Amino acid sequence: MLFEAGSAQEALSKAEKHFNCDRSYLRLYTIKPPRSMLWGFIKRRGVYRVEVYRRKSKETVGDYKAIDGTIEIKEGVARVKNPVGGGKYPSLIVNDQSIEVYINGKRAVGSCVVTEKDWIQFIPKKIHPVTRVEVKVTPDRMQAILKIERVPGRKYFLRDIEASNSVMISGDYEEIPAPDISVSQCIQELIKNGVLPEFILIEEIEKLLKSSKNGSAVVARGRPPIDGVDSRVKYFFVHRSYRNPDFNTDKKVDMMDHTIIPTVKVGEILAEKIVPAIPGMDGMTVTGEVIKARPAREAVFKAGKGAVLLDNNRIVATIPGRPVLERGIVRVNPVLTVPSDVNVDTGNIRFDGDVVVNGDVKDGLKVVAGGNIIVYGNCYHATIKGGRNIEIYGKVIRCKIMAGSNIIQY
């Protein structure tokens, strides 16, 4: 231990008080003797090193005992006491990464011996809390997902440690809650990522923020396209000739009446537009891209010869005859033309309009028309009945022919 004194005796007196022992147990070494300058007007004190002189053992010299130095930590401040009588100097063991320790301005690591003269500084670390907001737009850009991640912070502090010769630095921490985030901040983050405000679902954001846990939710949805609805037309007639349904009953039916040729009368409704075309509506993604809707297709709905369009949604027959549908156009043919013979394959011909037969009318067959009948071939054992005129350009052999039946009826 070094002492400044004007003489060796003064240094021993100071050492006796410091070591609390008699000077007979002390050994004095002069480091720097005192001196006088300017004829004794200026005196400089000397420097002496005084040690406890131990003769019998390492622990005691007579009644004097060696005392180890100590260090204690209280409220973040280190208090050091040097050893007495050859005891051990105190030490710090630094291995806690959350607490930085500086001794006399230098970073301390591991085991470090300290004295009363050392300046010891502790700097606890602080990890700031953070709340992260992440926006993800789905690949089809029809939804935006908001993810909230709350990371609490840590404020480290040094635990109090009782006085001891060797002290291990031990830190602890207080958790700092993550900062709150507002709905407006979330909306701004969504807008920053290209999401249009009109698609943002504020109530979904509020639900997400009310939860104390981390999580994600769909907070914006685009507008899907609505495809157009095609118009639909209902037809009230059969387009083609069909098998006589009476064959499926117990009725007595002429075998040659196997085919029914569809006919209509004046004023009959032929077709009606039951569903008008409804235009579609384009969609839009959450980022503003337009999604085209499929346009509605308008069915062809026109009246041809022998028909009329009423109220723009009904087609009505204006003449009797056979209804025909071609490429959406409905017409009524007043003349039924048989391109060849009336035979077993065609069966009997029954038609409300005019009938033209380009061939013969074979045995046992009938041609019944509401209008005129023209046969360019021969008639064999047949029945020809017309509502108006009948013209036969070939032979007529044993046939039953009746013309003008409509006039006779009325």
Image (cartoon, helix red, strand yellow):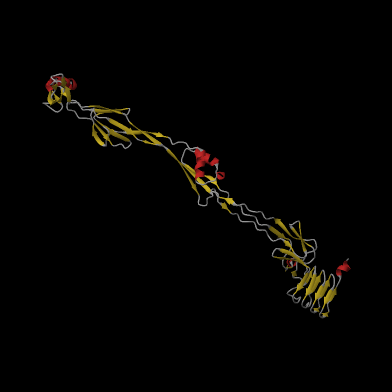
Q: Quadrant of the N terminus?
A: top left
Q: In this view, does 266 lie above or below 254?
A: above
* Count of all numbered marks drawn on residues in the image: 0
Q: Quadrant of residue 258?
A: bottom right
- 208 relative position to 97: left or right: right
Counting from the top left corner in percent of width and height, residue 294 is at 61, 56
Q: Residue at 58% across / 51% down in the picture?
A: 283
- 398 relative position to 247: left or right: right
Counting from the top left corner in percent of width and height, residue 315 is at 75, 60
- 270 relative position to 105: left or right: right
Q: In which quarter of the image is residue 267?
A: bottom right
Outermost front residue: 38
Residue 250 seen in the current view? no
Residue 274 seen in the current view? yes
Counting from the top left corner in percent of width and height, residue 141 is at 52, 50
- 386 relative position to 157: left or right: right
Tell which of 369 and 172 is nearer to you: 172
Counting from the top left corner in percent of width and height, residue 150 is at 44, 39
